[in-house]
Image: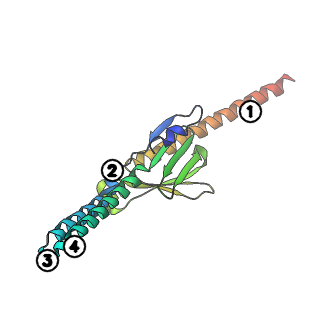
Amino acid sequence: MSKYVEKNLIRDEKIELKAKVNPLYIIKNIIFAIIFIVVGIVVSGIEGIADAGTPILIVCLAIGIIILLVGILRLTSIALSVTNKRVIGKVGVLKVHSLDIHIDKVDSVNIKSTLFGRIFRYYTLVIKSAGEAAVSFPAISNATQFKNTVTEAIEKHADEARKAQAAEIAMAMNRGNKY
């Protein structure tokens, strides 16, 4: 998914900042996977369960590996960037949410955190545009920097729009003086 943003750039558009995904976001998956694997090993080593020990070990290993793979898939499915023109992103594996908002249409960028997030320094960015549903991007380690970059891009776009409008007004006034 890391190439998602690059593939969707338009003419004269350049990436200002990419959101950094924190791999510690899947720490809960890692902990649960380890628990399942350890339980499988312990249960399979108990003497009274000789016949059922191997299948229990295999099931616990499979569950642990699946939990770990789900976490890795969730982690690798996050892509988010701010460009000089838009905020572009995509998140999700089975239920995919994509985001493509022109920079002047961004309504808000909010930062949410959980206990694990504060401990391991990752946050959830919630980006909303006017008239659209908010899209959440979890596991972002540079959330504050991303929010500030979006704000700066909005201000820069507004300044450029004001300058262009002033130039148009000046040209119109000069044309009016010629007659």
Q: Disc 3 on helix, strand or loop? A: helix
Q: Disc 2 on helix, strand or loop? A: helix
Say which amino acid is labelled 2. Pro
Say which amino acid is labelled 4. Ala
Query: Which of the two discs, 1 and 2, labels the residue nearer the N terminus?
Result: 2
Say which amino acid is labelled 3. Gly
Q: Would you say 80 lies left or right of 86 here?
A: left
**107 above or below 35?**
above
Coordinates of residue 13 in the picture (x, y in percent): 56, 34
Residue at which label 1 appears: 169
Mark closer to the observer (3, 2): 3
Residue at which label 4 appears: 52
Considering depth in this image, is 179 or 49 the residue closer to the camera? 49
Q: CA distance from mark 1 to mark 2?
A: 51 Å
Q: Which mark is residue 23?
A: 2
Mark closer to the observer (4, 2): 4
Coloring applied to the structure:
rainbow
Q: What residue sits 25% from the left and 66% below the top?
A: 36
Residue at which label 3 appears: 48
Q: CA distance from mark 4 to mark 2?
A: 36 Å
Q: What residue sits 33% from the left and 62% below the top?
A: 115
Coordinates of residue 172 in the picture (x, y in percent): 78, 30
Q: Would you say 21 lies left or right of 159 here?
A: left
The quadrant the N terminus occupies is top left
